[in-house]
Image (spheres, rainbow, N blue to C red):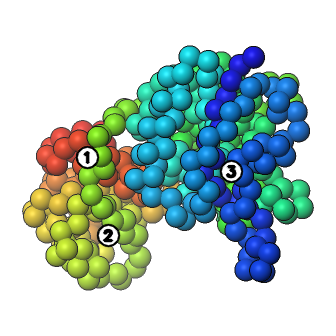
């Protein structure tokens, strides 16, 4: 019988109300989580490995990297067909993205989660786990990279995002759409994601800050972080990557001081581009060493810069990680 390793990390999928009435908290063991999935034992041999039991607001890039190492080891085991990771929905897209960047084995790695707690009416966890395990077992999922499976949809780690705070249909890949879906009798993959560059540093390269732009914001936060010698910044600009003029000046100051600055768009889809030549426009960034993040979202670009800084601090070389 084929084998799937399920790493449990926590999240609402493993939560129940606290007996003292303090709200929903981590409570369900890995074994109990799988016990709640009807028919799972008939699908394959499932081995649970408890990595953590935390809400995903407590997940960190360091923990993600440790998880990646354990997953890489599991992928090397000859009898393992694929890996499933249960996670909180709040930061699942970040963990999935980090693992997608550092792992290069063809064997499927499938993240899943639940929007409803294990104790809620119509909890979505068991069905999501079943779909994730079926995806991990399917040859069509080999070489897809890390995917996120919820609500029967299969999303690429680089494209997926949580789009609603509570609804079970919260996950989407805006402008791209899912890679496929899990149907009653088979897993259907309609397209394969773009080719990705994999790299795995021995350690993360320091704290990178993400700053989201809004109309009229000034440079105080950026200046404070420059003074504290932050390892790097990601700025979510408007539209094509434009920012308020004061912020623009601070970003250029940071680069002159050797602090890498990555530019993304706050639009949720599309790329920053050197279209506008006015004060605050993106053109000057292109000419002055700011790194353009392409389609990568702000939180994912932050992880990418932290990983890239673990490989090099050379500005020119850092650009190549975002090409
Ligand atoms: N707060 C939860 C988390 O751990 C949300 C969820 O899993 O849906 O991310």
- The x and y percentages for residue 305 are 31, 51
| Residue marked by disc 1 | 310
Name the residue: 50% across, 52% down: 94
Instruction: Please name whichever residue, 100 or 188, is drawn nearer the observer in this view of the structure.
Output: 100
Which quadrant of the view contains residue 199?
top left
Question: The N terminus appears in which quarter of the rendering?
Answer: top right
- Vertical side of 168 occupied by 143: above or below: above
Ligand 1's quadrant: bottom right
| Residue marked by disc 2 | 243
- Between the residue at mark 2 and the residue at mark 1, the CA separation in whole angstroms equals 28 Å
Name the residue: 78% across, 37% down: 130
Instruction: Please name whichever residue, 46 or 230, is drawn nearer the observer in this view of the structure.
Output: 46
| Residue marked by disc 3 | 113
- Between the residue at mark 3 and the residue at mark 1, the CA separation in whole angstroms equals 29 Å
- The x and y percentages for residue 281 are 27, 65
Name the residue: 68% across, 24% down: 3
**Is residue 184 shown to the viewer in this render?**
yes
Answer left or right for 32 relative to 287.
right
Question: The C terminus appears in which quarter of the rendering?
Answer: top left
Q: Is mark 3 within 8 Å of ligand 1?
A: yes
């Amino acid at each position: 019988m084929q084998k799937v390793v399920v790493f449990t990390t926590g999240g609402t999928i493993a939560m129940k109300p606290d007996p003292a009435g303090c709200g929903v908290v981590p409570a369900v063991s890995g074994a109990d989580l799988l016990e709640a999935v009807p028919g799972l034992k008939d699908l394959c041999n499932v081995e649970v490995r408890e990595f953590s039991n935390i809400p995903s607001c407590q997940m960190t890039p360091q923990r993600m990297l440790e998880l990646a190492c354990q997953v890489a080891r599991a992928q090397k085991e000859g009898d393992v067909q694929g890996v499933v990771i249960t996670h909180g929905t709040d930061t699942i897209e970040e963990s999935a993205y980090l693992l997608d960047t550092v792992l290069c084995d063809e064997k499927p790695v499938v993240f899943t989660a639940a929007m409803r707690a294990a104790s809620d009416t119509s909890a979505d966890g068991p069905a999501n786990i079943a779909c994730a395990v079926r995806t991990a077992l399917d040859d069509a999922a080999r070489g897809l990279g890390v995917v996120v499976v919820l609500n029967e949809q299969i999303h690429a780690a680089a494209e997926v995002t949580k789009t609603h705070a509570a609804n079970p249909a919260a996950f989407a890949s805006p402008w791209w759409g899912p890679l496929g879906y899990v149907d009653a009798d088979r897993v259907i993959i309609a397209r394969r994601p773009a080719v990705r560059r994999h790299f795995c540093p021995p350690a993360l390269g320091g704290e990178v800050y993400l700053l989201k732009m809004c109309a009229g914001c000034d440079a105080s936060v950026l200046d404070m972080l420059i003074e504290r010698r932050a390892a790097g910044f990601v700025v979510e600009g408007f539209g094509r990557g434009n920012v308020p003029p004061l912020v623009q000046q601070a970003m250029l100051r940071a680069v002159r001081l050797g602090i890498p600055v990555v530019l993304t768009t706050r639009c949720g889809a599309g790329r920053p581009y050197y279209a506008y030549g006015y004060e605050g426009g993106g053109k000057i960034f292109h000419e002055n060493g700011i790194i353009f993040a392409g389609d990568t979202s702000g939180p994912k670009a932050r992880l990418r810069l932290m990983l890239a800084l673990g490989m090099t601090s050379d500005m020119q070389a850092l650009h190549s990680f975002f090409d």
